């Protein structure tokens, strides 16, 4: 399977992270109610960006990992490929995650006169949960009960990293029954009432992404290609329509409906399915696509950085007001521009200084380990 970047997937990443950024404005960047945000949230809430991320992750990971592990003929080959996968994921995700956990904790301790970052005790606990990958379980336990801390977005990262850890084992254990196990996982969740605990272990979108990746190697996948979306504005209209539908399902009007998370997962998978053909169905090539692709390629850093920046901006405004100096307070648009500009700058720095160098180091380590085993593998083949 080709590892070439799919532009529509990058567009979906951008939409997902921008939706999460918008959803977190109220109560994080803006402590006081903003009438316009409240009016929008009554009819549309884009927190479904997290589920879209899950569907993308399931697809992107499975389209290379499943055929790689299934092609292994010995136990040693399987564990070598699994180790390589885990190493690449660790070098890709953990350095940035741990860096921003540390920075949030430092800001809580030394740059928190307004209290925007919360208490030191809660952030110490949240940092530990983030490092040890149980942030999703702590988030469910804290839900409306006690202060989580400023790194609450790590719940979804913990769930994804648990998936990365367990998925290779699931492939080898289920073997030819993997499709049925994943379908059962989706079906069961569609019928369940989502308690806080079930919300933070929801894997239906991840499973649908994996199923889509597995289907993409079948001949029927090409026969179902949505070629009608190539017509002008058809793809964009589909993207907007599906996004608005998910935003409406995410509103409080459907909070008691047990099926809404499953429906959002299915709609997220539909968008990933359309994007997977790499035909620019969702957004045609051009300047807007390039901008969205930039956002998508930096989406991991943006996701980690946006809450610390929101709280940092609140702290700066508080200090400016305390000193009697001009500040963006009372001007939501200025506050928003300041926060988004800082997010863009820091995410670019994170991408260039942390993400890409560490990703390359991980790839180099995997290459060295694989090379060092080549003579042994050759001798085993001869025997």
Image: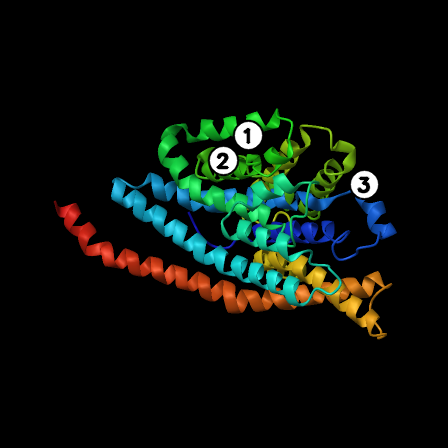
Mark positioned earlier in the residue sequence (3 or 2): 3
Quadrant assignment, res 141:
top right
Location of residue 293 in the rendering, given as x and y in whole percent from the top left corner: 60, 58
Give 326 or 366, whichever is nearer the viewer.
Answer: 326
Q: CA distance from mark 2 to mark 1?
A: 10 Å
Dot 2 crowding, Cα within 10 Å, few <14, some 14–19, many 20+: many
State the image coordinates of residue 166 (x, y, percent, origin top left).
43, 40
Quick check: can you spot residue 266? yes
Query: At numbered mark 2, what does the secondary structure look like: helix, strand or loop?
Result: helix
Of residues 361 and 146, the one nearer the viewer is: 146
Residue visible at 49% across and 55% down in the picture: 93
Q: Is residue 318 above or below residue 252?
A: below
Is 93 placed left or right of 153 in the picture? left
The residue at which mark 1 appears reads as 186
Of callouts 2 and 1, which one flags the residue occurring earlier in the amino acid sequence? 1
Q: Which residue is mark 2?
A: 211
Q: Residue 90: percent from the left, percent from the top?
A: 44, 54
Examine the rendering and report whether any part of residue 277 can be seen: no
- Name the residue located 45 percent from the left edge and 35 percent from the top edge: 219
**Label 3, label 2: how many angstroms apart (C-alpha)?**
32 Å
Identify the element where label 3 is drawn.
helix
* Image quadrant in which you'd find residue 179: top left
Q: Are marks 2 and 1 in contact (CB under 8 Å)?
A: yes
Residue picked out by circle 3 = 43
């Amino acid at each position: 399977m080709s590892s070439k970047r799919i532009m529509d997937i990058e567009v979906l990443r951008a939409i997902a992270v921008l939706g999460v950024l918008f959803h977190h404005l109220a109560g994080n960047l803006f402590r006081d109610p903003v009438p316009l945000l409240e009016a929008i949230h009554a009819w549309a809430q884009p927190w479904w960006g997290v589920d879209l991320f899950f569907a993308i992750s399931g697809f992107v990971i499975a389209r290379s990992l499943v055929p790689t592990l299934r092609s292994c003929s010995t136990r040693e080959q399987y564990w070598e490929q699994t180790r390589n996968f885990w190493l690449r994921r660790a070098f890709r995700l953990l350095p940035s995650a741990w860096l921003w956990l540390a920075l949030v904790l430092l800001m809580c301790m030394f740059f928190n006169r307004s209290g925007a970052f919360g208490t030191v005790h809660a952030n110490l606990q949240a940092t530990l949960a983030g490092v040890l990958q149980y942030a999703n379980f702590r988030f469910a336990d804290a839900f409306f009960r006690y202060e989580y801390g400023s790194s609450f977005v790590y719940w979804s990262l913990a769930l994804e990293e648990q998936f990365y850890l367990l998925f290779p084992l699931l492939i080898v254990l289920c073997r030819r029954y993997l499709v049925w196990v994943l379908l059962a996982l989706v079906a069961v969740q569609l019928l369940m009432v989502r308690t806080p605990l079930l919300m933070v272990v929801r894997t239906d979108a991840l499973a649908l992404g994996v199923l889509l990746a597995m289907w993409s190697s079948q001949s029927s996948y090409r026969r179902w290609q949505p070629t009608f979306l190539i017509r002008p504005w058809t793809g964009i209209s589909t993207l907007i329509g599906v996004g608005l539908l998910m935003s409406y399902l995410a509103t409080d009007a459907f909070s008691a409906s047990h099926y809404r998370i499953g429906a959002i997962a299915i709609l997220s998978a539909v968008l990933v399915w359309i994007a997977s053909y790499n035909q620019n169905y969702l957004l045609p090539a051009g300047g807007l696509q390039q901008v969205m692709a930039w956002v998508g390629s930096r989406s991991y850093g943006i996701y980690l950085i946006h809450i610390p920046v929101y709280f940092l901006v609140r702290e700066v405004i508080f200090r400016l007001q305390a000193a009697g100096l001009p500040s963006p307070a009372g001007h939501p648009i200025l506050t928003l521009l300041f926060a988004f500009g800082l997010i863009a700058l820091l995410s670019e720095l994170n991408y260039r200084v942390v993400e890409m160098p560490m990703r390359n180091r991980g790839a180099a380590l995997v290459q060295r380990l694989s090379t060092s085993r080549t003579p042994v593998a050759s001798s085993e083949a001869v025997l």
